[in-house]
Amino acid sequence: MTGTRKWVAAVFLLPALVLLGALVVYPIGYSLWRSLFDADGSGFVGLGNYGDIFSDDATLTAVRNTAIWVAVAPALCTALGLIFAVLTERVRWGTAFKLIVFMPMAISMLAAGIIFRLVYEQAPEQGVANAVVVGVHDTFADSSVYPKARPQGQSDLKASGGGAFTTGASAEPGTPVLLPLVGIAPNKVPGDPGDAKAAEPSGDEVTGTVWLDFRLGGGGEKGQVDEREKALEGVKVEAVRDGEVVATTSSEADGTFTLPADAAGAQLRLPASNFAAPYNGIEWLGPTLITPSVIGSYVWMWAGFAMVLIAAGLAGVDRNLLEAARVDGANEWQVFRRITVPVLAPVLSVVLITLVINVMKVFDLIYIIAPQPTQDEANVLALQMFRYLDGDNYGLGSAIGILLLVLVLPVMIANIRRLRKERRR
């Protein structure tokens, strides 16, 4: 068209063709050839490596997880990108919001993996995710008062199953019941505990004291309320007769409690709710949630990419179409579903196809975030290929590489066809 001779064009294209052949064509060809040989390359096995791929449990898990990634991650990123792009058009601080959402793209997968490994830590004092979950849980659910407390060895309290402790003798009015506990350092008692007080006897009610039978520096008599021993406030005490709870109360700030006359002749029980371990959040990095957790970190990084591309496409939408639909009586949801989304369909397909190809290669996020005990459950094809290559099994590693290529080819072909159709238009 420009009158340029073909050999001149070939000269200019030659460096790019050489680079393309060295970095793309040759590696593909060598991988295909290497996949036909055994681990060290000394024996020809034909398609044996491909048969081993689908007979190995670890590889089958990787195939399943890769399918989950392809089905979930690109769709989530695209949907969030579309929502962010549409909503930020209507607010003044939309540019600042887009900047914040896009910022994770500026860091590497390695850095993102390290960040989310800390975010998903099990201990609420270290992991942000569980700190939020535990905070919300404890707002609506009562946590145990003294999770590490246990009865003093010489007391009448004995384990009665399910983490509860029950007295052996029955409680009677006029005789205060002593319920000494240990297992907590005096300076570690929650809140600001005061000194324990021996309960006063009552003629028609059951009284008693729950306290920490230990004080710093030692001293005192076991099983008796001594000076400077701390009261345990808020301990639930139940009166149980014939397996049924007949009365319930909680200890006061000085450790004393009072039960009505109905508790006479009943055994006193400290239920397990007083001693249950505190809620420790969700096991994000456990075998059940490891894949969704890693996908969440990927969405955090790539939703900004989808948002920027979709926002660029949205800027080119004819506003007259939107206004005409509103004038005809369409609400915002109808405008979004019937006008905005169909007009943005080419952009959405570009974003979706790009992310599908990208998730096929996900490796570093899983390798960094998933702990070694649960890495098998989070395994994907790219990680399994690395494992084989790291173990010097180049035959199986190359076979998985060719498998990934075969899986990506349909997506690439669909993308090429879409580009040709757009050129014809």
Image (cartoon, rainbow, N blue to C red):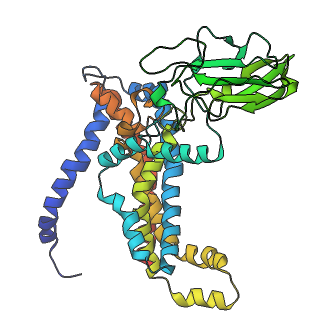
Q: Position of residue 91 (x, y in %)?
A: 49, 79
Q: Nearer the viewer, residue 336 or 70?
A: 336
Q: Determine the residue located farthest toward the top in the rendered image.
A: 154
Residue, x 34% and y 49% (percent of image)?
112
Q: Nearer the viewer, residue 80 or 351?
A: 80
Q: Quadrant of the C terminus?
A: bottom left
- The residue lying at 52 percent from left, 71 percent from top is 345
Q: Nearer the viewer, residue 83 or 96?
A: 96
Q: Which quadrant holds residue 98?
A: bottom left
- Rendered position, 44 above or below 371: above
Res. 409 visible in picture: no
Percent x, y for residue 11? 11, 65
Measured as percent of width and height from the top left, residue 364 is found at: 34, 42
Of residues 138 and 321, which is closer to you in this image?
Answer: 138
> Viewed as shown, does residue 78 lie left or right of 335?
left
Placement of the N terminus among the 4 image quadrants = bottom left
